[in-house]
Image: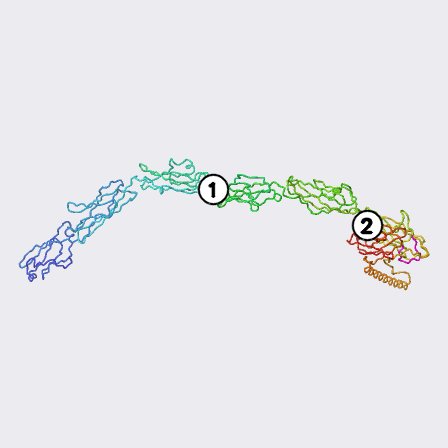
Amino acid sequence: MEEGSVVANLATELGLDVKMLSKRMIRLEVVANRKYLDVNKETGDLYIVERIDREYLCTTKTSCFLKLEAIVENPKRIFFIEVEIIDINDNTPHFRKDTNEFDISEATQAGERFSVNNAVDPDVGSNSVKTYHLSKSEHFDIEIQTGRDGSKFADLILKQELDREKQAVHNLILTAVDGGTPSRTGTASITVRVLDTNDNAPRFDNEHYRVNIIENSPIGSLVLRLNATDLDDGSNAEIAYMYSLYTPEMTQNTFNLNSRTGEITVKGVLNYEDFNIYDMEVIATDKGVPALSWKCNVTVVVEDMNDNHPEISIKSFQSPVKENIEVDTVIAVVSVSDKDSGDNGVVHISIPENMPFKLRETSDHYFELVVSEPLDREKVPEYDITFTVTDRGSPPLSDNETMTLELLDVNDNVPTFPQSFYTIRVMENNAPGALLDSLTAFDPDLHENQYLVYFIIEREIANTSMSMLFSINPENGKLYALKTFDYELEKEFVFHIEARDSGVPPLSSNVTVHIIIVDQNDNTPVIVSPWRAHGSVVEEKIPRSTDKGSMVSKVIAIDGDSVLNSRITYQFLQVTDATLFSLDQYNGEIRTMRMFSYRDPRLQRLVVVAKDNGEPALSATVTIKLSTVETAVKSYSDMSEVPLEYDIFSDLNLYLVIGLGSVSFLLLITILVTIVLKCQKSKSGIAAPPCRNSVLSERNSTIADSTLVSNDAYWYSLFLAETRKGKLVVRQPAPKGSRYIVSSLPRSTGLTMTSDSAPSTLQVRTTSNNNLCYSD
């Protein structure tokens, strides 16, 4: 109770008069205790001076009394007073030890009891310890006991067996509760340490391990670190690892197991293609007594590494084959393989793109090589076909194999000549059997398809077969002449030569051959004018008064050779006086270079040589004896030709030259007008070719049948003669290289001239006054 609290009124309790208490000097004496109470002398109230602690006053007693003596005077009286101190629940239960520790073996059987220090409470009665509570536990409980003195205590009871491996230490809270209102509690901790026994076998983290490792891993590479745990303690938890008897010896030789750490490392070479899955059984054993063990299964899967090159296998191969093999024909069958797995074992096969073949897949890993385009042995006689296989590994590996496909020839090519037209020039007078040329055809086929036979396709020209004129070697195509050719008789031949192979069926082709006979300078020029008997000398007379530039004679020679070889030039071989006569080297005209003088001999001897243009050159000579006479001899009065040139420089008087020139010019104009009028008259009256700028004069009455040919670069002269002195001369400018052939016929039929330089015909006719005109 609080200080000053009134416990009782002594006046009332003792039967004293309140008013008399002070007079009677009431006082209060405490027996053997501190003065906790006192009395109010005015009122007689017994009140508390100091707060009272029952547990202090009465430690061991269940009841507590304060003994007091109340003394009053007048009269003096002593009252004995007992004040009972009633306990209140003002103390909390407490344990003598705040912590209780127990070491209990995990092998202890359930129901075992363990004493726990009880709690004490200074309060008494219902305020003392009434019960205990234990914190929640699966393994422990308490049982409350009552002592002889009525005190309460608790026993710790094991209600379920302990397992150190599950829980090595159990921490409990024991609570003591008194019976006061409100109740008070006190707590103490209980620590139970579970002592180990070898009751647990080692345990692996997993019962089955599956580990992947790359093949070709280095020796000593870590594969797996096994971890077995033993829930026991001490030596009971020490573990050793080993292979069981069910582990194959090959596996033990491939992998090493560390007995202390449980590490599995590579011991041998790992090759996926040889063995890719290893199974092993590992045992973990502790060192307890008795020892306990456990096992696990380990599967080591070797992962494939792209360490194997893909392989090609040729299952069938057809070689050689004919070049005309059909498209889509199977040539070869190949298979591909790769010992690796996954993408490392997926193989792609290919061939070069520029080949007439393709690959066709028939089944897994089998491919057919088929013809995709027509083959031609002549273009490509054989193919080196390279099969390339590549896997999908990283990095990819590849391999290749090459096979040679040979093509057999078939007769599918026609023999061909290098040229479609051959022009062969053959020199005349060739020797019979002379080689003309080699006409070799080419056939790209092989063997008998390539063997060629040559022959001349028969053709008759002028009832003459080509095989009588030419011969060809059937084996090599060499062309020979069977006879000697004469340019003047035969100028060209055109025929065909065929080349035929020996294939089945045979193929052939032909070529046109144009044989041109080349002229050889084998004809000597023949002098036809002036005419003379064989071996005789020509004698001519000229007036001594002949003017300078007058033509005294003309030498005409003909040559049967071609144009170049028949081109004739003239020159003096011998001349009596070189200053008297000149000789035109192209037309053979002999003219005076000056007038005769009285000193000049009467007889002049001229030797003229006519030389062709051949190599070597051939020539003919003629000797002309000129006799000068005093009277003018009109040898060529009937000739209507005009000298080619005049020497305008002369010793004559200048006036004479001018007069002669004027007369000549007027004469020329008159002749030209006359010719034009006659030609127009001929066109209107008779359907005959007109005269053309030339007149042919006949000196003799008869013209014999003859043919004369002359070639000249500048002038063409036609001479027809029958008697010694009778002659007919035609002078006509013509292009260089032209040639006229003039045939003389009887006078009634006229003359015909042809030219090989133009397709037209030069016709010559006789006029009424015995003059000849010609026209194209």
Residue 591: image x %, image y %? 88, 55
Q: Residue furthest left?
A: 75
Exactly how many numbered labels are in the figure? 2
Would you name the residue on which mark 1 appears?
A: 340
Residue 110 in picture, x, y percent from top left: 24, 41
Quadrant containing the C terminus is bottom right
In the image, taking residue 235 as reference, residue 558 lies left or right, namely right
User: How far is the residue under mark 1 from the one under mark 2?
Assistant: 95 Å
The amino acid sitting under disc 1 is: Asp
Q: Between residue 460 and residue 104, name the one nearer to us.
A: 460
Q: Nearer the viewer, mark 1 or mark 2?
A: 2
Above or below, 144 relative to 74 = above
Q: Would you identify the image quadrant in which residue 285 lies? A: top left
Disc 1, disc 2: CB below 8 Å? no
Question: Residue 165 at x, y = what percent?
Answer: 30, 43
Of all residues, the one furthest to the front in this rendering is 685
Q: Local crowd at mark 1 within 10 Å, few (<14), some, or many (≥20)?
A: many
Along the line of sight, the residue nearer the viewer: 560 or 120: 560
Q: Which mark is residue 566?
A: 2
Q: Which residues are magenta?
A: 540-552
Q: Is residue 201 magenta?
A: no
Q: Name which residue type carries label 2.
A: Ser
Instruction: Name the foreground residue: 413 vs 537.
Output: 413
Which sits in the foreground, 484 or 86?
484
Q: Quadrant of residue 102?
A: top left
Q: Quadrant of the N terminus?
A: bottom left
Q: Secondary structure at mark 1?
A: loop
Q: Earlier in the sequence, mark 1 or mark 2?
A: 1
Residue 57 is situated, as x and y percent measured from the top left of the image, at 14, 52
Callout 2 crowding tier (Cα within 10 Å): few <14, some 14–19, many ≥20: many
Res 550 → quadrant:
bottom right
Tag 2 secondary structure: helix
